[in-house]
């Protein structure tokens, strides 16, 4: 089976964007792939070093994974910092990647803001650690939201430069693997990982501004639906969601210049596993005053079982910690082998 890796940062409450763009895809891939899902706690300290309760946040993301239907026995669930090979390989990748590559990352520019000189070095090197997270398992597929596309391209660039720069050594060590990239057949140690971005909600937008992505760090809690929101809060947030005054259009093309309407229809489609056209066939011509309550009911129906199960799991932090420990041990077995290979390719005495 192909190997999938993906991670989520324990930087705050998970929202509908994380759920539809990432976690629900994680769940769906379990039948056809071997999956490794990671709470990336080392990434959480890149933008903000001190967190109120990083341990609780880490357990809360783990609970969201399990409550959504990820099976930690058939697959691997763990927190990044307990497998030191992520940080070790990231150092090697810091030496493979170029500073110019990192400077071009839009997430770095957004998160560093105007005072770039004062951003942490970790924030600049974030994509290097992300490449290490994926490639320390030589994962071939990564389900992510659309905002992570650029980082995935960088992961491929790092893998390709490593494969080219060390091609002779990889061959001498007998570690070259044949792979197909587009039409081309190449050999190398690290795979050129494919992002899995498609889906009905690759980028869920803010409920307050249809041109901005829904995000944990948005100052307005009304901009997002958190997985932990109760039914009343979900209803209130959808009722207050920004919209234009027109009714819903009669076809999907009519959503083109209407970001807020497009976002709400996209959310409905993703939550109900239907196409946007289907939703427009049902609600086209209706006012938001009729569509919003239907959307709220659907969001509550899908999210409530997840939040109830999350709360139940969080009552027993010992169980969550045991899942992370067991997953960490199984992840380590793979990551240790990769680092042994990388050390012999580079020429480090092990
Ligand atoms: N709005 C979104 N729509 C679809 N997918 C999204 N993801 C995040 N926001 C959306 C996807 O969720 C996964 C986990 O994200 P993360 O927590 O590791 O990092 P992030 O992308 O930085 O998430 P946030 O919520 O926007 O956090 P802040 O505000 O801290 O930047 C990823 O697969 C991501 O694509």
Image (spheres, grey):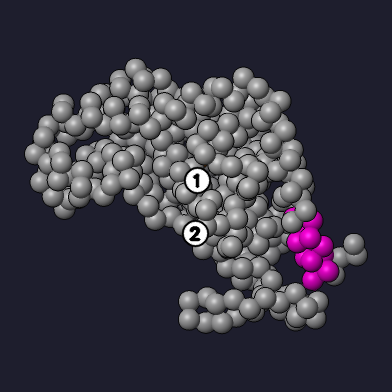
Label 2 near ligand 1 (CB < 8 Å): no
The residues tagged by marks 1 and 2 sit, at their Cα atoms, a distance apart of 16 Å
State the quadrant of the C terminus.
Answer: bottom right
Residue 9 lies in quadrant: top right
Residue 1 lies within the magenta run:
no
| Dot 2: element | strand
Report the side of 279 relative to 9 (left or right). Answer: left
Report the side of 286 relative to 11 (left or right). Answer: left
Residue 35 appears in view:
yes
| Dot 1: element | helix
State the quadrant of the N terminus.
Answer: bottom right
Residue 64 vertical placement versus 90 (above, below): above
Q: Which residue is mark 1?
A: 27
Report the side of 5 relative to 339 (left or right). Answer: left
Q: Which residue is mark 2?
A: 195
Residue 57 appears in view:
no
Residue stretch in magenta: 335-346
Label 2 Cα crowd, 10 Å radius (few <14 / some 14-19 / many 20+): many
User: Which residue is depicted at the point 58% across and 62% down?
Assistant: 2
The answer to whether the residue labelled 1 contacts the one labelled 2, judged by CB atoms less than 8 Å apart, is no
Residue 272 lies in quadrant: top left
Label 1 near ligand 1 (CB < 8 Å): no
């Amino acid at each position: 089976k192909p190997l999938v890796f993906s991670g989520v940062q324990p930087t705050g409450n998970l929202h509908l964007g994380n759920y539809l763009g990432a976690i629900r895809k994680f769940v769906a891939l379990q039948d056809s792939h071997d999956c490794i899902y990671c709470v990336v706690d080392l990434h959480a300290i890149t933008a903000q070093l001190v967190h109120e309760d990083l341990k609780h946040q880490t357990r809360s993301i783990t609970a969201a994974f399990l409550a959504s239907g990820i099976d930690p026995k058939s697959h691997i669930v763990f927190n990044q910092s307990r497998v030191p090979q992520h940080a070790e390989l990231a150092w090697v990748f810091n030496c493979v990647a170029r500073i110019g590559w990192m400077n071009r990352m839009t997430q770095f520019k957004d998160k560093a803001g105007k005072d770039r000189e004062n951003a942490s070095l970790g924030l600049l090197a974030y994509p290097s650690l992300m490449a290490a997270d994926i490639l320390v398992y030589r994962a071939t597929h990564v389900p992510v939201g659309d905002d992570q596309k650029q980082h995935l391209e960088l992961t491929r660039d790092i893998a390709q430069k490593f494969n080219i720069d060390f091609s002779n050594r990889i061959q001498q060590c007998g570690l070259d693997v044949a792979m197909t990239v587009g039409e081309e057949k190449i050999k190398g140690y690290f795979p050129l990982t494919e992002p899995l971005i498609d889906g009905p909600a690759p980028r869920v937008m803010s409920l307050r501004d249809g041109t901005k992505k829904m995000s944990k760090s948005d100052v307005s809690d009304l901009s997002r639906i958190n997985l932990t929101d109760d039914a009343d809060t979900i209803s209130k947030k959808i009722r207050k969601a920004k919209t234009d005054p027109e009714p819903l259009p009669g076809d999907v093309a009519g959503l083109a210049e209407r970001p807020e309407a497009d976002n709400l229809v996209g959310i409905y489609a993703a939550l109900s596993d239907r196409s946007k056209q289907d939703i427009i066939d049902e609600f086209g011509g209706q006012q938001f005053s009729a569509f919003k309550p239907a959307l709220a009911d659907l969001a509550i129906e899908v999210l409530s079982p997840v939040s109830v199960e999350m709360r139940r799991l969080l009552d027993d932090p010992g169980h969550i910690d045991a899942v992370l420990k067991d997953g960490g041990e199984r992840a380590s077995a793979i990551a240790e082998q990769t680092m042994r290979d990388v050390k012999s390719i580079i020429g480090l005495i092990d």
